[in-house]
Amino acid sequence: MSTPLTRAARSARSLLPARSDLADVRRDPRRDLLAGLTVAIVALPLALGFGVSSGLGAEAGLATAVVAGAVAAVFGGSNLQVSGPTGAMTVVLVPIFGRYGAGGVLTVGLIAGFLLVALAVLRAGKYMQYVPAPVVEGFTLGIACVIGLQQVPNALGVAKPEGDRVLVVTWRAVEEFARTPNWTAVGLAVAVAALMLAGARRRPAVPFSVVAVVAATVVARLAGLDAAAPIGDLPAGLPAPSLAFLDAGALGSLLAPAVAVAALAALESLLSASVADGMTTGQKHDPDRELFGQGLANIAAPLFGGVPATGAIARTAVNVRTGARSRLAALTHAAVLAMIVFAAAPLVSQIPLAALAGVLLATAVRMVEVASLKAMARATRSDALTLVLTAAATLVLDLVYAVIIGLVVAGALALRAVARQVRLDRMPLDEPDEPDGRDDGEGERTAAADALSAGHIVAYRIDGPLFFAAAHRFLRELGEVAGVRVVVLRMSRVTTVDATGALVLKDVVEKLNRRGIAVMTSGIRPGQRRVLDSVGALELLRREGREYATTAEALRGARDHVDLTGPLPAEPAAVPARPQRGSEEPVR
């Protein structure tokens, strides 16, 4: 017997690792190990760069890639997802770091982790699929622009100016560079970015990011380029887990940023997992379990000094392209990065910041899918407008506001398009009913058609949803009917009715009745009766005996009503206006 407790237990078990995960790991471990090694090589400069960009330093990016990458690989809902620090998350973290410092960023990540776990328990993962594609594309384009602009200070070799608005910071960095140019940093950044972009076109399988960073580091050290500032000292290993950063007094003020981080982590992780599914056959991620895994990853990462993490689309794509089949690949990626942290920290600390800026500049360029942007721009004007507004809001405001604006605009435009589909068509009375087996015969329709020809009955068919976005236009059109005894409304093609639509229908019936015009309806669906009845529209029709099952019955009732009330009175003949005194023409 199923009880609430047993159902809750089954729900909780569905979020935990299963035996099938272990079976997948054993299927082709050699292939997964090789894929994980490749992803780690690609992820190393990205983890360093995103750590530096967040404000917490390169060591925070590495800690995130190791800890969050391992936890999400074990508990996440995708066999192929690779998690860690990302550019989108860094964009959100920069203003948080500027206002609350490192402790604020770590606390936000911890709160966001618990929020993601709550979303998983509430089974909210399925709702992420309703985010429109233009919003996602505009969001991605805006993020790419922000990531690129964030690298300008390091690429120019100047100290990062104060401020949390990327456009302002970029402008101040350019002004500082104009005063004291650092062409060494510019050269390294441009060279690394160019090598990555050119190499990716010719040899996509080669990790040119690592090649470029190593080459830039060697050149900078051998040539003694003092202007190429290195990352700085990195700890040889991960710090011990600690909650020393947690400030209970600041939790209230950090809740709103934590909600933003959780929303972004959920959106980006599920989007990345969907991309991985689309690149393979036979793979299907569990969205709720993915949220659960990302939640645990974000709870664990701050304890080791890591920034909030999410599924990384670029690294996940590399994982799939290099042949990954199970979670072992993502776990291998985290293990390799951990070994680098423990064994090669002194070497990694010599990487020039300008080189990492070049890596992220190239990453920003590669994030922009020109073909997808063109497709969205050419689809409809609504899609193009949604994309542009979302991208602009991402650049000018922040990511959460950008997604909200994108969703609101997309929703409003979609409602506008649906509202335009609602039609109120005048129908011929000899048109047959819907094929429901209740047609009363051609003879009745012919008699009613004769009444129509006499000008006493008019019939309309409503097509589409009768809801708030279209109901008032329906009222305006139907309220203009005049010169008839009866209006017949055929409602068998109404797809849905909301409270506003029901109220408008009631208002129309009352206004026409006050003008002496009877309203008869046919074909009201069972599912729409409750809404109509709740506002009194159905009772109004029933009281007058004017609600029918079929159109033929309604037309017969209309004819009987005309026979009972008699024809409309003839229009009085126009009487010429009497001439005003003094304007008479003289008799001739």
Image (cartoon, grey):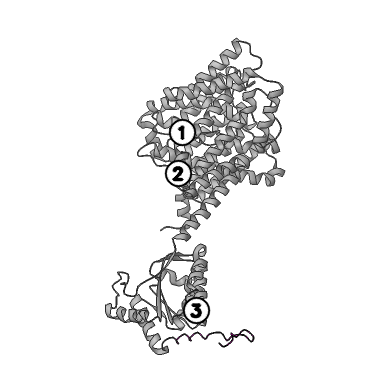
Secondary structure of the residue carrying tag 1 is: helix
Residue with the most extreme front position: 588
Residue at x 64%, y 39% (from the top left corner): 107
Q: Position of residue 99 (x, y in %)?
A: 70, 38
Q: CA distance from mark 2 to mark 3?
A: 45 Å
Sequence-wise, the earlier of marks 1 and 3 is 1
Residue designated by label 1: 316
Q: Which residues are magenta?
A: 568-587
Q: Position of residue 413 (x, y in %)?
A: 51, 54
Name the image quarter holding the N terminus: bottom left
Q: CA distance from mark 1 to mark 3?
A: 63 Å
Residue designated by label 2: 378
| Badge number at residue 275 | none
Q: Is residue 577 magenta?
A: yes
Q: Main secondary structure of the magenta part?
A: loop
Secondary structure of the residue carrying tag 3 is: helix
| Badge number at residue 512 | 3
- In the displayed structure, 575 sits above or below 521; it is below
Foreground of the two, 269 or 476: 476
Q: What type is the residue that disc 2 sits on?
A: Arg
Residue at x 37%, y 79% (from the top left corner): 452
Residue at x 66%, y 17% (from the top left corner): 227
Q: CA distance from mark 2 to mark 1?
A: 29 Å
- In the displayed structure, 200 sits above or below 430; it is above
